[in-house]
Amino acid sequence: MNGWMTLLDRYIIRKFMGTFFYAILLLGVIIPVIFDLTEKIDDVVEKDIPITELVFSYYINFIPYFANLFTPLFLFISVVFFTSRLANRTEITAILCSGVSFYRFLRPYIFSASLIAILSFLLNSFIIPPANAKRLQFEYKYLKFNWNRNFNNLHRQIAPGTFIYMESFVSQSATGYKFTLEKLNQQEMLYKLSADYIRWDSVTGKWYLENFTLRKFSGKKESLIRKAQIDTVFQFRPQDFAYADDDVEMMNYFELNQFIANEQEKGSDFVDYYIYERHRRMANSVATIILTLIAVPMSGRKVRGGTGLHIGLGIGIAFTYVMMMQVSSVFATMGGANPAIAAWIPNLIYFVVALFLIIKAPK
């Protein structure tokens, strides 16, 4: 039993992977597609969506997104299911009585969970984002006809020393209200531009402004220019400050990092959400290992109630994990909490639970 990969390791890895991919197929593919199609069937019929486009543009890209999003939970339930069966058949008791320590027994579990964690991170960071772009493009075309993004009280730094403000901005029409642009040289204001209304002209690549006012400052002197309307070129475009959650889902790991750096420079109000999303991708992958460390000692005991009791407890723990992820998301984006810490808090709490269960597990 001292070899790196023994018959026992291969047996557990085979059970682990087989049960997990069966759960992914059932819980992450077949059932979600059936429910999603049932919900959208009226739109499919009413808008006469081509079946080939529905399958190859939407569901081919929807399946990996949904399956990977809940991979830690599917894995957790899978480990609880097959480990509980091993315990009920007294296989775990026989393994431990043969001289294999509980920590050695955990090794193939950790190995399998680590492989899935790496695969999940690669999917989440590089493969799923371009698939999300196709999926969301389909949704915007057929399912979100009235889709829009409204932003209020926008503050941005578009260049060093150059700041803009808009009371409101509607991305669909690329129009803003109560627009202000200020140019500073250290603490000295060089000029201030304001307009009641601003609209982007995608044909000319210019901004159209109404009730335009420009104040220029030179020492104690001030000049004032007013116009009813004007077309001009700025250093920004609508997409530079009108990003939404969906845009972030279409970015791979490196694009997201660059995007966060750009948004921090501009002073975006949504930087915390973007940072949270970056850490969430990593935390979601690491969660597969942590939840495995909880599932094994929790379901490794032979108890009255058998597999059903273990699965019930497992589903309860899985739902509390999802709830904690949602709470941490709210704290990161709206509660002022550090987004990096908020993304990892559920994993840290459950890691402590895992250590406690492992210490208390029969050896």
Image (cartoon, grey):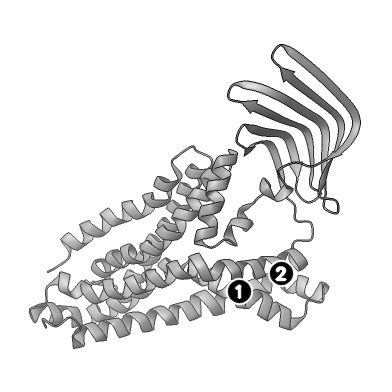
Please tell me which of labels 2 and 1 falls first in the chain: 1
Which residue is identified by label 2?
138
Residue found at x 11% / y 83%: 1
Q: Is residue 259 above or below residue 223?
A: below
The residue lying furthest to the front in this view is: 218
The residue lying furthest to the right in this view is: 228
Asked whether the viewer can see residue 231, the reply is yes
Residue found at x 33% / y 79%: 16
Disc 1 crowd rating (10 Å Cα; few below 14, some 14-19, many 20+) is: many
Residue found at x 60% / y 40%: 266
Q: Which kind of residue does numbered mark 1 sit on?
A: Asn
Q: Is residue 242 left or right of residue 260?
A: right
The x, y position of residue 353, in whole percent, is 27, 56
Q: Is residue 227 left or right of residue 320?
A: right
Residue found at x 70% / y 37%: 152
* Label 1: which secondary element: helix
The x, y position of residue 296, in whole percent, is 26, 70
Q: Is residue 303 left or right of residue 335?
A: left
Which residue is identified by label 1?
61
Residue closest to the eye, 333 or 209: 209
Asked whether the viewer can see residue 69, the reply is no
Residue closest to the eye, 89 or 2: 2
Disc 2 crowd rating (10 Å Cα; few below 14, some 14-19, many 20+) is: some
Which mark is on residue 98? none
* Label 2: which secondary element: helix
Asked if the residues shown at circle 2 and circle 1 are in contact, with their CB atoms under 8 angstroms apart, the answer is yes
Q: Which kind of residue does numbered mark 2 sit on?
A: Phe
Q: CA distance from mark 2 to mark 1?
A: 10 Å
The x, y position of residue 188, in whole percent, is 63, 20
The C terminus appears in which quarter of the rendering? bottom left
